[in-house]
Image: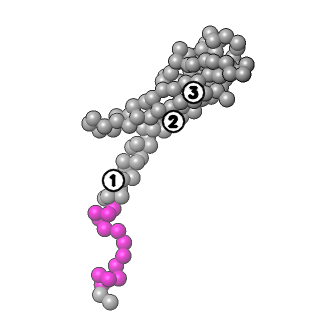
């Protein structure tokens, strides 16, 4: 067996390729995770606001207070859609975030939900 046939492993080009792929995924993850965490905070605030009171104003005020505490900046109380379904208050929301990638390329994240 010659020396070249016994060698195994990754080449420098392969290492650079996979390193670049992993770096791109890490950068995307670092930009997406804060928006995802904010969407979880929004869902929690919507659930709490739905229990706040019988009026639309009470619900929006409660959401705005929760948003201030949880550093929610994507939506506010005016953006909530408040309805009654079978006698229960249902608070729903929808919004989108754009993350600039490079040049004219953007990543669009769409979030939507309703109270439980």
Task: Give neighbour class at mark 1: few <14, some 14-19, many 20+ (Cα, 10 Å).
Answer: few
Front residue (pair 48, 88) = 88
Q: Is residue 54 above or below residue 69?
A: above
Q: Which residues are magenta?
A: 3-15
The secondary element bearing badge 1 is classed as helix
Asked if residue 53 lies in the magenta stretch, the reply is no
Residue 75 screen position, x and y as percent = 50, 21
Q: CA distance from mark 3 to mark 2?
A: 10 Å
Mark 3 or mark 1: whose residue is earlier in sequence: 1
The secondary element bearing badge 3 is classed as helix
Between circles 2 and 1, the one closer to the viewer is: 2
Asked if residue 4 lies in the magenta stretch, the reply is yes
Instruction: Indicate the quadrant containing the N terminus: top left, top right, bottom left or bottom right.
Output: bottom left
Label 3 sits on residue: 42
In the image, taking residue 4 as reference, residue 48 lies left or right, namely: right
Mark 2 or mark 1: whose residue is earlier in sequence: 1
Between circles 3 and 1, the one closer to the viewer is: 3
For residue 62, say whether it is visible: no
Label 2 sits on residue: 36
């Amino acid at each position: 067996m010659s020396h070249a046939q016994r060698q195994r492993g990754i080449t420098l080009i392969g290492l650079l390729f996979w390193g670049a792929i992993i770096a791109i995924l890490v950068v995307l993850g670092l930009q997406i995770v804060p928006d995802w965490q904010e969407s979880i905070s929004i869902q929690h605030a919507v659930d709490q606001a739905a229990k706040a009171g019988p009026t639309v104003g009470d619900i929006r005020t409660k959401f705005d207070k929760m948003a201030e505490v949880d550093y929610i900046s994507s939506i506010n109380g005016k953006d909530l859609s408040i309805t009654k379904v079978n006698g229960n208050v249902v608070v729903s929301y929808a919004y989108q975030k754009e993350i600039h990638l490079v040049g004219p390329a953007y990543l669009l994240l769409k979030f939507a939900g309703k109270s439980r």
